[in-house]
Amino acid sequence: MPDITVARYAANQGSRRFAGPVARQHRRVACATLACCLGLLFWANHLHAHEPGLSTADIQWRSDRIDIVLTFSVVDMDNVFALDNDGDGKVSQLEFSYAKNRLGSAAAGLVELQLDGQKLSAAEPTIQMDAQNNIEFLMRFAAQPASNLTYRCLLFSKLPRNHRHFVSVKDAGAKLLGERLLNADADTFNEPVSGASAETGTAAVPQQNTFLSFLFLGIEHILTGYDHLLFLFALLLVTREFISALKIITCFTIAHSITLAVATFDLVNIPSRIVEPLIAATIVYVAIENIILRAEPKGRWLLTFSFGLIHGFGFASVLREMNIGAARGGIAVPLVSFNLGVEVGQITVAVILLPLIWKFSKSPVFITRWIPACSAVVALAGGFWLVQRVFGF
């Protein structure tokens, strides 16, 4: 009997010694997960999946003048000119009407246009706010035939550092003469446009510059598209084989390439107020599926393809905001190069993530604890964005 009591005592002491490290490990996992969740809430509250940061200048020669249509997002204009009077985070048509005269007075300081080194002055601009939450400035400059056009965006110093300004120049027949993507470091478009005021122009479109500009824009968009990255991370988190990961990435690529093309060509147009909540919902769904199954579900490639179609409309909003679909003759290069940039960024992320995921997957603790924990954090972020986008917080 005493021997049994001693044995039980020793066993209890051993289990306590064993339970101590396990409990501490569980507490560390719980604390780390909680910290990640709190950090992600703070992070998600200050990040948006698609920052405005994009504007366009559509320049067209006429027989006796040059017309420029400037398009800026309401958010960018609000940051520069403080249009939101009641502080509700939105600019109503009434608030826009109050600020219209102020915007008209400031229009001359938005851009600078020169012909052969001579600065042109614009007439009183026409200003409107469209249904896509953009503010458009129609500016008209009296002009004469010239050999060189210089356009400069003067607003970069007041906009975020990553702002991009897409400039396109067309002749009187709407033929594309040149285009360029400007930024804070390269804020000037300078092109020979001899004869552009006639029905046909002689300037050549700088295809190489356009290709590289949109390639880098695509890379930047995916690397700063935190919702797309979290979706990709949730998909790859439970993969165990190279073929499986390849199927997921390929299906996602094909799907969003399809919708990116049809949306950019304006064959299908789904409003952002519908697309953005759906993107957040796809993140939540995949994360919850990971928590429940803790392994890659059968046929996830099909789910990835379906959800990739939705994400493609999100990518397309970048080119649509820049009015790329309206650039006849110039849409192919931006579309292909932007999509290629998205793929380069996506593959780069996958190449970094997959070796780490596969290495940690060899540990049972990673499968039983960390996959649910990471997926919970992803679901939390997706849920936050879903509520934010549905209710407009």
Image (cartoon, rainbow, N blue to C red):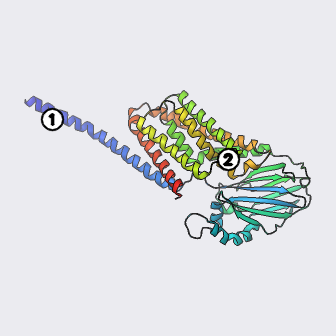
What residue is drawn where x is 70% and y is 46%?
266
Tag 1 secondary structure: helix
Relative to 16, residue 323 above or below: below
The answer to which image quadrant residue 250 occupies is: top right
Give residue 41's position: percent from left, percent from top.
46, 53
Give residue 383's position: percent from left, percent from top.
47, 49
**Would you call the spot at circle 1 few (<14 residues within 10 Å), some (14-19), or many (20 or more)?**
few
Disc 2 or disc 1, which is closer to the eye?
2
Q: How many numbered marks are there? A: 2
Tag 2 secondary structure: helix
**Would you call the spot at circle 2 few (<14 residues within 10 Å), some (14-19), or many (20 or more)?**
many
**Left/right of residue 57 with respect to residue 223 in the rendered view:** right
- In the image, 124 versus 146, the foreground residue is 124
Quarter of the picture containing the N terminus is top left
Instruction: Give the residue number, with chain letter if any, for mark 2.
Output: 217
User: How far apart in space, not on screen, are marks 2 and 1 (Cα)?
Assistant: 67 Å
**Left/right of residue 303 with respect to residue 140 in the rendered view:** left
Residue 255 has which mark?
A: none
**In the rendered image, is residue 327 in sight?**
yes
What residue is drawn where x is 84% and y is 51%?
174
Give residue 124's position: percent from left, percent from top.
79, 69
Please state which amino acid type lies under the numbered disc 1.
Tyr
**In the rendered image, is residue 43 in sight?**
no
Please state which amino acid type lies under the numbered disc 2.
Leu
Give the mark nearest the N terminus, 2 or 1: 1
Q: Do the residues labelled 2 and 1 touch (CB within 8 Å)?
A: no
What residue is drawn where x is 85% and y is 60%?
66
Residue 9 has which mark?
A: 1
